[in-house]
């Protein structure tokens, strides 16, 4: 009999075209706090989805042994019945329901004739809230408490399911320091009550503080598991990034010209919580022909910065100045930003980038319809020609530009988004996670396109969660942390270790 | 890993198929796309048989247009509203209100007929601007704003009428609803003017179709096989010829049809070829993406409702002119018929999809059902039920079709 509560043995999970996990092994001892580290896309979330039954038994290879018993989960209900509860980064709470209603959602406390016993529901919820250190009334609505407390409600909900193994996916990403500390203390407290936790986190100081052991995953493989005594930030960073950077990125010889865009003291506040500063006095510049990266952890404010700059598409109380070729410009709405030569390709193609029920042609033309006007009307033959040229030059794999973009693969969808923005003929392109969710071959093509645009003298800003990608394609890298630029490194000095250090640099308090 | 060498570079061409196979597949996809058109033909044939041919008598064909003109006018505006992801429940009340106001202008104040018409259309546009303001700039859902509008403008119509009807409109005004262009070249059994217009229309349609096709070919676009193209043109010309003949032997071309024809042409161009029209579809397909592509979504929403108000006013004028009466019950239920027409015509409930042509055909299907069932003496209660079922099945068919082709 082992002391391990969980053993995942040789887990391999493939998606069409991508091997997300290969031969991953994870051993978690009973009663410990086990951290899992890895870059975005390394396979952490996939592993947790395999564990919790989101990917049911049969869709992966390998064995899961939980409490010395091989388990085969068909869905989340199966894993929860065994006491494995996962709390996702995006909280799964219904804002208009009360705390108690959320805790017992789909697990209602029933009384006479199968009706919900509200007195018991609220008193049970009250007991659970006390265990997680919340003094809110169980009847308070979720929307009326902050994110930090919502996170605690999620944990109370897990406790109501008699959790034995609690999995937290980036639990502190959206929290402030005080809430984070409280949450981490709670996890340690629960450990005292015999609850094992797996915590997925980027924050190295956090990991050092609470975890008993750390497993590092990279490219879908387990690198190593380090015991608490041996944990050091340097070792974790080395494990996380230590891959061969050669040959993943096309050669790029920069021809850097004059400054093309400069942003001064750019500040934006959260749209709802208007006192929260999300982008904090950002200063940066881009030169013609230069590829500039913005590195930052989840929640650092990268997308928020880009979208607030691009026609104030995000945030409130936005202040700061933008200069193009030395002259101040306004970007008060998207049309104005486009007219001033900016383009922003979103990180979320499906929600913000494409009209999925429309064809390639009309998606490519949408931002530049004025250019296609002949005699006041859109020339649809010309539109077809333009779209077809992009289909060929961008290698969009579709027999015709009349295909709906919703049916294309992620890589081809991304090429359509890029085509739209390249056709708008911008001087500066902001590319937000340009290779998210697309396969390696298509990634290489996207990098080649980015290089080509830089060679044409455009300024490129690349936002990416994948540090090796930024280091592989950029000429210069800014690090963003908690909405602030914490440093700027030319590519020659930008080692993964150095950038990660800047990315995790926290505000002096 | 050696990803660098394995990247695909050859573009994927269309899969090779035989010429015959591709011709067949063209016809099949065309029929699929024009399912609504086929449905109209089926309904027409069905009721022609059931009514022993009364449905297709010249007088009845002319009546079909005049009786449904105002619904078709509303359907044109409604389909655009629906494509943008909104709805307008107020059009019936707005039509009644504008009808009443036009009565005040043309009858009570005795303004010249043309001034009365222009002012009335302006009132409609202002009503649209009012609703557009709340929808676009305040952000209240169109359903709520226009539900309120339905009550507000019905109330205002009653207030303007002061519990009485306004009648005896000037003759020029009346011709909007029941005037005919005829006998311009003297009296004949078959009106030569109508025939002439029909021939010109046929020539224009053929020329336009051929030009579109050759333009596409020049740009290397896929076009339908010549044979199928020719068959379609012949069918169109034959149908047009029959229709023209029917009008020519009855009273000539209804003014309502001329208004409708102009609207269909203008709005088809607007929806397909103008930047404004493209923006409507972009908003309906994905509002966020449209916004991030520089579409001024609020402006588009606003003008869309101004336009709807204008068309509702026009429909109100045509209806009032036809009855020669502005009454409190005018426009009752118009909104539901216009919305049904748009959905039967293939507009998507979630927005982003819909055509002017589809909405017109949808409106004609409702019109033929109304007309055919009336000829057969079917009571209003069953007419309602049948129209409800047709709407339900039309949308269900659409949903089913999409699920099959979308793989979901």
Image (tube, rainbow, N blue to C red):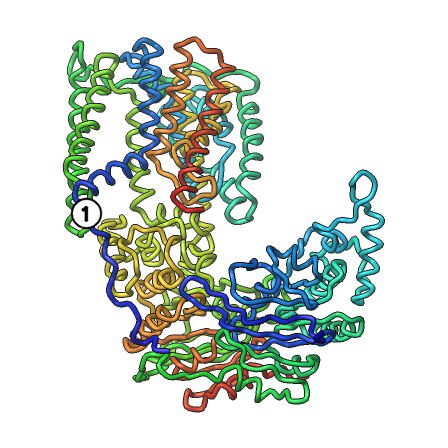
Q: What is the quadrant of residue B186 in the picture?
A: top left
Residue in the foreground of this view, choosing between A56 and A326:
A56
Does A413 sit left or right of A160 as displayed?
left
Is any part of residue A359 visible from this angle?
yes
Residue tagged by mark 1? Answer: B216
In percent of the image, x 34 and y 25: which residue is there? B40
Residue in the foreground of this view, choosing between A395 and A475:
A395
Residue in the foreground of this view, choosing between B107 and A476:
A476
In percent of the image, x 45 and y 70: which residue is there? A433
Is any part of residue B119 visible from this angle?
no
Q: Secondary structure at mark 1?
A: helix
In percent of the image, x 68 and y 62: which residue is there? A85
Residue B183 drawn at (x, y percent): 20, 14
Residue placed furthest toward the bottom: A493
Vertical placement of residue B174 versus B17, above or below: above
Other-residue count near label 1 (Cα within 10 Å), few / some / many at <14 / 14–19 / ≥20: some
Vertical placement of residue B188 versus A290, above or below: above
Does B245 sit left or right of A447 as displayed?
left
In percent of the image, x 28 and y 54: which residue is there? A401
Vertical placement of residue B155 versus B61, above or below: below
Q: What is the quadrant of residue A270 in the picture?
A: bottom right
Residue B299 drawn at (x, y percent): 44, 49
Vertical placement of residue B301 versus A174, above or below: above
Residue A396 drawn at (x, y percent): 30, 61
């Amino acid at each position: 009999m082992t002391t391990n509560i969980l053993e995942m043995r040789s887990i391999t999970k493939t998606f069409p075209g991508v091997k997300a996990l290969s031969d991953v092994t994870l051993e978690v001892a009973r009663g410990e706090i086990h951290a899992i580290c890895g870059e975005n896309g390394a396979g952490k979330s996939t592993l947790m989805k395999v564990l919790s039954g989101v990917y049911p038994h049969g869709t992966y290879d390998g064995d899961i042994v939980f409490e010395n018993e091989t388990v085969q989960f068909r869905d989340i209900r199966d894993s929860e019945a065994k006491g494995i509860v996962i709390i996702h980064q995006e909280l799964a709470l219904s804002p208009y329901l009360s705390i108690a209603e959320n805790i017992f959602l789909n697990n209602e406390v029933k009384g006479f004739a199968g009706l919900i016993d509200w007195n018991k529901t609220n008193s049970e919820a009250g007991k659970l809230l006390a265990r997680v250190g919340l003094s809110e009334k169980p009847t308070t609505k979720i929307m009326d408490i902050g994110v930090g407390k919502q996170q605690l409600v999620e944990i109370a909900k897990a406790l109501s399911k008699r959790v034995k193994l609690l999995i937290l996916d980036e639990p502190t990403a959206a929290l402030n320091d005080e809430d984070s500390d409280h949450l981490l203390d709670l996890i340690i407290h629960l450990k005292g009550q015999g609850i094992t936790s797996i915590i997925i986190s980027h924050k190295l100081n956090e990991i050092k503080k609470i975890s008993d052991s750390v497993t590092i995953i990279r490219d879908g493989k387990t690198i190593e598991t380090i015991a608490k005594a041996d944990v050091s930030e340097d070792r974790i960073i080395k494990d996380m990034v230590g891959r061969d950077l050669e040959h993943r990125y096309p050669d790029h010889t920069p021809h850097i010209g004059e400054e093309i865009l400069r942003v001064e003291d750019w500040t934006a506040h959260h749209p709802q919580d208007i006192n929260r500063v999300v982008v904090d006095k950002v200063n940066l510049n881009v030169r013609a022909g230069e590829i500039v990266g913005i590195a930052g952890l989840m929640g650092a404010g990268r997308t928020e910065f880009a979208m607030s700059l691009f026609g104030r598409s995000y945030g409130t109380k936005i202040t700061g100045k933008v200069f193009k070729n030395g002259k101040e410009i306004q970007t008060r709405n998207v049309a104005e930003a486009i007219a001033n030569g900016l383009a922003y390709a979103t990180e979320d193609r499906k929600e913000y980038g494409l009209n999925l029920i429309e064809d390639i042609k009309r998606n490519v033309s949408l931002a530049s319809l004025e250019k296609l006007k002949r005699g006041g009307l859109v020339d649809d033959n010309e539109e077809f020609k333009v779209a077809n040229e992009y289909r060929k030059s961008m290698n969009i794999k579709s027999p015709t530009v009349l295909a709906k973009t919703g049916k294309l693969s992620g890589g081809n969808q991304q090429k359509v988004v890029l085509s739209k923005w390249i056709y708008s003929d911008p001087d500066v392109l902001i590319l937000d996670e340009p290779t998210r969710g697309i396969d390696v071959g298509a990634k290489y093509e996207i990098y080649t396109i980015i290089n080509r645009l830089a060679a044409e003298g455009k300024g490129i800003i690349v936002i990416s969660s994948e540090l090796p990608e930024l280091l592989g394609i950029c000429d210069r890298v800014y690090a963003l942390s908690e909405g602030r630029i914490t440093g700027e490194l030319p590519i020659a000095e930008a080692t993964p270790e150095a950038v990660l250090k800047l990315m995790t640099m926290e505000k002096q308090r | 890993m050696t990803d660098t060498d394995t990247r695909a570079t050859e573009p994927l061409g269309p899969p090779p198929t035989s010429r015959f196979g591709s011709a067949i597949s063209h016809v099949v996809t065309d029929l699929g796309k024009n399912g609504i058109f086929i449905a109209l033909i089926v309904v027409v044939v069905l009721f022609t048989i059931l009514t022993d041919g009364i449905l297709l008598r010249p007088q009845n064909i002319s009546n079909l247009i005049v009786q449904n003109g105002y619904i078709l006018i509303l359907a044109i505006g409604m389909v655009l509203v629906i494509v943008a992801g909104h709805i307008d429940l107020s059009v019936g009340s707005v039509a009644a209100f504008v009808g009443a106001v036009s009565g005040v202008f043309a009858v009570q104040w005795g303004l010249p007929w043309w001034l009365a018409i222009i002012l009335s259309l302006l009132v409609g546009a202002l009503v649209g601007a009012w609703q557009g303001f709340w929808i676009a700039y305040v952000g209240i859902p169109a359903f709520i704003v226009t539900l309120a509008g339905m009550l507000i403008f019905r109330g205002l119509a009653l207030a303007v009428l002061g519990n009485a009807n306004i009648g005896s409109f000037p003759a020029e005004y009346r011709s909007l609803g029941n005037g005919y262009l005829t006998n311009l070249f003297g009296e004949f059994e078959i009106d030569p003017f109508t025939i002439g217009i029909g021939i010109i229309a046929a020539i224009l349609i053929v020329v336009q179709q051929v030009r579109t096709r050759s333009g596409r070919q020049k740009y290397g676009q896929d076009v339908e096989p010549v044979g199928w193209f020719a068959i379609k043109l012949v069918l169109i010309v034959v149908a047009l010829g029959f229709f023209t003949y029917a009008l020519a032997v009855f009273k000539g071309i209804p003014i309502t049809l001329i208004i409708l024809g102009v609207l269909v042409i203008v709005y088809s161009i607007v929806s397909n070829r103008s930047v404004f029209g493209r923006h409507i579809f972009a908003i309906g397909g994905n509002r966020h993406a449209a916004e991030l592509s520089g579409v001024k979504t609020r402006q588009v929403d606003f003008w869309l409702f101004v336009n709807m108000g204008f068309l509702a006013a026009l429909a109100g004028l045509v209806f009032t002119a036809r009855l020669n009466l502005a009454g409190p019950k005018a426009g009752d239920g118009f909104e539901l018929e216009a919305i049904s027409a748009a959905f039967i015509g293939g507009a998507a409930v979630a927005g982003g999809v819909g055509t002017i042509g589809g909405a017109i055909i949808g409106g004609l299907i409702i019109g033929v059902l109304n007309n055919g069932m009336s000829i057969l003496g079917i009571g209003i209660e069953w007419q309602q039920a049948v129209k409800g079922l047709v709407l339900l099945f039309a949308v269900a068919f659409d949903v089913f079709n999409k699920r099959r082709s979308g793989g979901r």
